Amino acid sequence: MPTAKKVFRVDELNVQIYRGETELAQNVAEIAQNYLRDVLQQNGKAFVLLATGNSQIKFLDALIALDGIDWQRVTCFHLDEYLGISAAHAASFRRYLRERFHNRVNLKEFHYIEGDTLEPILECDRYSKLLQAQPIDLCCLGVGENGHIAFNDPSVANFQDRYSVKLVKLDQLNQQQQVKQGHFPSLEAVPKYAFTVTIPTICSAKKILCLAPGSHKAKIVQKMLQGDISTDCPVSVLRQYSQTTLFLDEDSASLLSQSTSSHTRKS
Ligand SMILES: O=P(O)(O)OC[C@H]1O[C@](O)(CO)[C@@H](O)[C@@H]1O
C-alpha cells in the first residue's frame, strides 16, 4: 500500500501529498474501497456522489480494478452537467460517467442529471429530491483552476445555498479551461449554463475525497490552503469540514510554503 509523503491538517481539512498522480489515485481508490466496504457492512447500501474531469480518470480506473466492492448495493449520483447538451455529446458528463464507470461495474443505480431537459427548473427540483432522500456516504471531488467544486464557480458560489441543485452561469475562466482541456473546440461551443450540486449538499457528505493532482493546480491549491476561506476560492470551504481529505501530488503542492503544514486553526 503506497503511503503519503506528507500528511498534515489545515484548519479541519486533512491533506495528503503523494509523489505523483498514479500513486495518489491508487491510494484514494484504496481509501474509498475500504470506506465503502465498511458502509455496506453497516448499512447494507451506500450512496455515492461522483465528479468527472481529468483528475478522476486514474482514480476511477484504480477503484474499478480493485474489484472489492459489491456495487450492486451502491447508488450513484453526479455533481454537475452542462445545460443543453445530449448524453451522447463528447463533453457530456453523463457520457464520461457511463463510459468510464457505469458500464464497467455492476451498479444498483446511477441517477443522471438530464442536461438536455426542456424544463431545467423542474430538473433541479427532481435531482434535489433524489439527493435529499438519503444521506450521501461518499463524495469524490475535483478542483477547477478557478477554485470551483462541481460547477460552483467563484461568481456563483454560495456557502449557504438552500437548494441541493441549481442552474448556474459558467464563468469565463471556467469556459476557457474547458476549451484548453480539449472538451470543446472553441469558446463559443462551451455551454453558458450548467446544473450543479450546491456547496452545502457537497459538504453534507459523510466522507469527502478531493483529488487535485498536477502543476496546473498549484496556484489554486496555494490559495485554497493559504488564503481566506471565501467564495472567491469556493474549494476553500472544505477547510471547515473534518470528514474531508485533499489529495495532492508534488506538482500541485509545489507552491505551498513549509509553514502550511503547521497552519493554525482560526478562532
Ligand atoms: O478534474 P479536472 O479536469 O481538473 O477538473 C476539475 C473539476 O472541474 C469539473 O470539470 C467541472 O465540475 C469537474 O468535473 C472536475 O472535478
Image (cartoon, grey):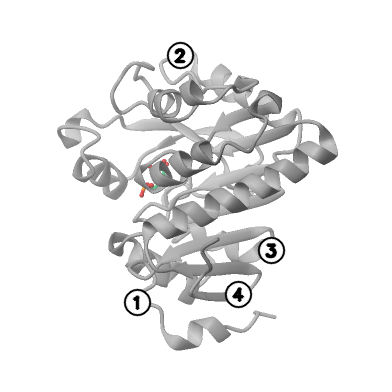
Cα distance in 3D space between marks 3 and 2: 36 Å
The residue type indicated by label 1 comes to Leu
The answer to which of marks 1 and 2 sits earlier in the sequence is: 2
Cα distance in 3D space between marks 1 and 2: 42 Å
Local crowd at mark 2 within 10 Å, few (<14), some, or many (≥20)?
some
Cα distance in 3D space between marks 3 and 4: 9 Å
The residue type indicated by label 4 comes to Arg
Look at the numbered discs 3 and 4 and tell me whether their residues touch, using CB distance below 8 Å. no
Residue at the image point whose x is 47% and y is 34% from the top:
80
Circle nearer the viewer, 2 or 4: 4
Residue at the image point whose x is 57% and y is 36% from the top:
67
Q: Circle 2 — which element?
A: loop
The answer to which of marks 2 and 4 sits earlier in the sequence is: 4
Cα distance in 3D space between marks 4 and 1: 16 Å
* Residue on which the image places disc 3: 242
Q: Is mark 3 within 8 Å of ligand 1?
A: no
Q: Specify whether 94 is left or right of 187.
A: right
Residue at the image point whose x is 33% and y is 16% from the top:
88
| Residue 207 position (above or below residue 123) | below
Image spot of residue 181 (x, y percent)? 23, 43
* Residue on which the image places disc 4: 9
